[in-house]
Structures are given as structure tokens and as C-alpha cells.
Amino acid sequence: MKRSLYRDRDYAFGQVMLTLRTVIGLTQIELADLLGVTRRAVGDWEGGLTYPKAEHLPFRPDARQRRFAPSGKRPARRCCSMKPGLAR
């Protein structure tokens, strides 16, 4: 029997990644920017094609605290006229 050249997808893992991203209210591009990877990498994780490497998932409480309100929702975008370093 001939084996397929395509890898099996891990749909369960992909669904967890998709659910976590949407619960915190990020797009694939926003998550990719936050983690320092490409949007395609995030799409591959969510599609069950690949897994993120440990170095792409650092514990970054500072990023979360600046980006999200206590409710878990993103705060309103700040005006570009604010002092540098305060926005984002």
C-alpha cells in the first residue's frame, strides 16, 4: 500500500489554537505580530499542519497586560498623538 506524501493534520490542536486566538480577540496577523512569526505560521498551526516552536511562545505577561483590559477584551485603540511608548 502506497503512503501519502501529505502529513496527517492535527485538527484537535488546530481547533484549540483557533479557539484561544478568537477568545482573546486577535486576528491571525495580530497574533503573529505579538509572537514574532508570520500570519501563515499561525494559519498552519490552526490548520493542524504544524506546531509552534517553544521559542515562539514565550511567557510575556507584559505584552498581555499592555494589550488587554481585565475583561480579556482589547482596549480601544489609542490616538496616534499620544506620547511614544504609551500606545500599544
Image: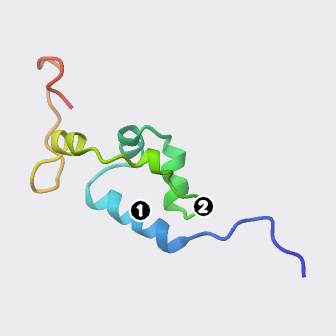
Q: Is residue 84 above or below residue 53?
A: above
Classed neighbour count for the residue bearing mark 1: other residues with Cα under 10 Å, few (<14), some (14–19), many (≥20): some
Q: Residue furthest right?
A: 1
In which quarter of the view is residue 30 placed?
top left
Q: Quadrant of the C terminus?
A: top left
Left or right of 58 in this view: 53: right
User: Marks 1 and 2: in contact by CB < 8 Å?
Assistant: no
Q: Residue furthest bottom?
A: 1
* Residue at image location 11% in from the left, 20% down from the top: 82
Provide residue 25's location: percent of width, then percent of height.
27, 54
Classed neighbour count for the residue bearing mark 2: other residues with Cα under 10 Å, few (<14), some (14–19), many (≥20): some
Label 2 sits on a secondary structure element that is: loop
Q: Quadrant of the N terminus?
A: bottom right
Q: CA distance from mark 2 to mark 1?
A: 12 Å
Label 1 sits on a secondary structure element that is: helix
Provide residue 31's location: percent of width, then percent of height.
37, 46
Task: Report the amino acid beneath label 1.
Answer: Met
* Residue at image location 22% in from the left, 45% down from the top: 61
Q: Earlier in the sequence, mark 2 or mark 1?
A: 1
Q: Which mark is residue 17?
A: 1
* Residue at image location 48% in from the left, 74% down from the top: 12
* Residue at image location 47% in from the left, 40% down from the top: 37
Tell which of 56 and 23 is nearer to you.
56
Provide residue 41's location: percent of width, then percent of height.
53, 48
Task: Report the amino acid beneath label 2.
Answer: Leu
What residue is shown with label 2? Answer: 49
In which quarter of the view is residue 8 placed?
bottom right
Q: How is the image coloured?
A: rainbow
Left or right of 40 in this view: 58: left
Q: Is residue 39 above or below residue 80?
A: below
